[in-house]
Amino acid sequence: MAKLPPIRLIRLEDLQGADASVKKLVAILNPFVENVYRAINRGLTFQENIAASIQTLTFRTSSTYEASDTFEPIVFETTFNQRPAGVMLLQLFKTESPEAVLKEASTITDWRELSTGQVSIRFISGLEDSTRYTARVLVV
């Protein structure tokens, strides 16, 4: 993989004798190049650079969740106005003990877009009966 060059801007001292319009262009170009450099150098984030929404959701499983896969859909609004391409589970824990993040394989196995900006999670696997959970999900 290519590495970013160490030079991130054009110094005005290097342009001695250049036309004033060139110096104006460099003055405008340097901040742009610096921002692009920072973004490419591990500065890209989902929320600032990709149409995405991170949601924190709290829900309770039914008393027959494990035996019958009964799951009350979780409906929430996203913060962007386009069709979601996916919903990913980032973190899941029992609400009563947030320090113990679940490490078992829990997955969002069924979700739907209800309307623009509204999503319904219809099933999350790997949970226990009658338990209150908090989940962080990424919608892209």
Image (tube, rainbow, N blue to C red):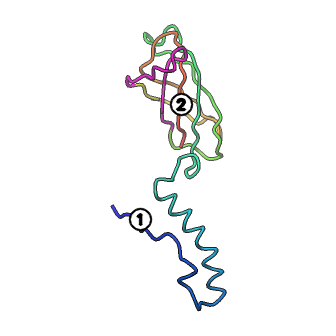
SS assignment at label 1 = loop
Q: In this view, does 84 lie to the left or right of 124?
A: right
Look at mark 1 in the image and give the residue it sits on: 4
Nearest the viewer among 116 and 94 is 94
- Give how far across and how far down residue 127 sits, in percent: 45, 17
Farthest top residue? 63
Q: Label 1, label 2: how many angstroms apart (C-alpha)?
A: 33 Å
Residue at 56% x, 82% y: name it.
13
| Residue 67 point in image, percent of width and height | 43, 9
* 11 relative to 33, above or below: below
Is tag 1's residue or tag 2's residue first in the polypeptide sequence?
1
Q: Which residue is drawn at 45% across and 23% down?
A: 101
Which residue is at a point 65% across and 41% down the rendered structure image?
Answer: 79
Disc number at residue 136?
Answer: 2
- Residue 63 on the magenta segment: no
Quadrant occupied by the N terminus: bottom left
